[in-house]
Image (tube, helix red, strand yellow):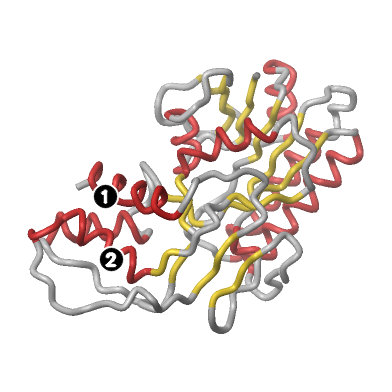
Amino acid sequence: MRFLVIGSGGFVSSNFTEFCPSDVDLIFAGRNAPLGGSEWLVIDYSVKSITRVLDAVRPDVVVVNAWVGIPDFSVKNQVASLNLISRVGEALKSRCGDGFRVFGMGSCFEYKFPSRGVKTVRISSELETEKIFSTAKQLARNILEQSCVEVGLEFTWVRPFYLFGKNQRVGSLLPALVAKYKRTGTLLELANSNGGCDFVPVSELLSFLRSVVDLACSRVINFGSGHFISNVEVMLLFREVIGSQLEPRSFFCEDTHTGIVCGDSPLNVVKDGYELRRMIKEFFMENL
């Protein structure tokens, strides 16, 4: 099955290359070469260049993974991203009868964050309307969905939760823990000790998309582990990995949980919480 990924640079695309299912022929289109040596076609994100790539590749699946400037969520970058998505949408409008499936990459931050406690998020949950990145992603979904509906293409908007894995930016929590310890031999001080996330390995994302290609599913699906892990527990997992190399300085109660839990994924990406915790510890061990 031929997958065309529009948006070749960045964390997610680099993991598509390394963790590509055996029955997927992966081709990237974008300004920057993907990590890992996958086939890459240069585009300038004009409608003409995107259309040219669609003609050349004849994909079974198109994954729209392009966005500008993450983690800089400025108004300028969101406007630039929406202009880019609009051009992808225009190119898709020329594909009447092609019959491929389109996945658009959204974000868990489209959902409204709870003011307190743990919130189980479903597709029907309230959306965030006041933050520029959240509303830009929702507008992007509308643009792509309308273009696909117009020409009869199957469309699914995927909202990943807290992805972690190789090539993740150092400012993210898990890589930041590793970087601080390797640099100073000390633990990172948590800015938000009451927080937490639905962590999900980015290595599973492309396999997840492949598994739902032929399934009848809603226009929006969540990609999450279904397990909440607090920032405090992440610290405990990291301490387990480094063991006696660091003298403990305090006790932590892992019964306190606040944050977001994701549900509604059509398939179980991670079988249980123990497996997820093993994968987080494996990330630490591989990068220390």
In-image side of 18 versus 124 (left or right): left
- The amino acid type, in three-letter code, at marker 2 is Met
Q: CA distance from mark 2 to mark 1?
A: 11 Å
Q: Bin the neighbour count of mark 1 within 10 Å (Cα to Cα): few under 14, some 14-19, many 20 and up.
A: some
Where residue 221 appears, as percent x and y from the top left, is 69, 50
Q: Nearer the viewer, residue 47 or 227?
A: 227
Where residue 55 appears, as percent x and y from the top left, is 74, 18
Q: Against 135, is 189 above or below?
A: below
Q: Nearer the viewer, residue 110 or 131?
A: 110
Q: Secondary structure at mark 2?
A: helix
Q: Which residue lies at the image location 64% right of the left edge and 32% below the top edge?
A: 211
What is the residue that sits farthest to the bottom in this orientation? 116
Q: Bin the neighbour count of mark 2 within 10 Å (Cα to Cα): few under 14, some 14-19, many 20 and up.
A: many
Q: Which residue lies at the image location 76% right of the left edge and 64% below the top edge?
A: 124
- Are the residues at dot 2 and dot 1 in contact (C-beta closer than 8 Å)? no
Where residue 164 appears, as percent x and y from the top left, is 42, 50
Q: Against 7, is 113 above or below?
A: below
Q: Which residue is mark 1?
A: 284
> Which quadrant does the N terminus fall into?
top right
Where residue 85 appears, as percent x and y from the top left, is 70, 46
Q: Which residue lies at the image location 42% right of the left edge and 29% below the top edge?
A: 18
- The amino acid type, in three-letter code, at marker 1 is Phe
Q: Against 273, is 59 above or below?
A: above
- Which comes before the other along the chain, label 2 or label 1? 2
Q: Which residue is mark 2?
A: 235
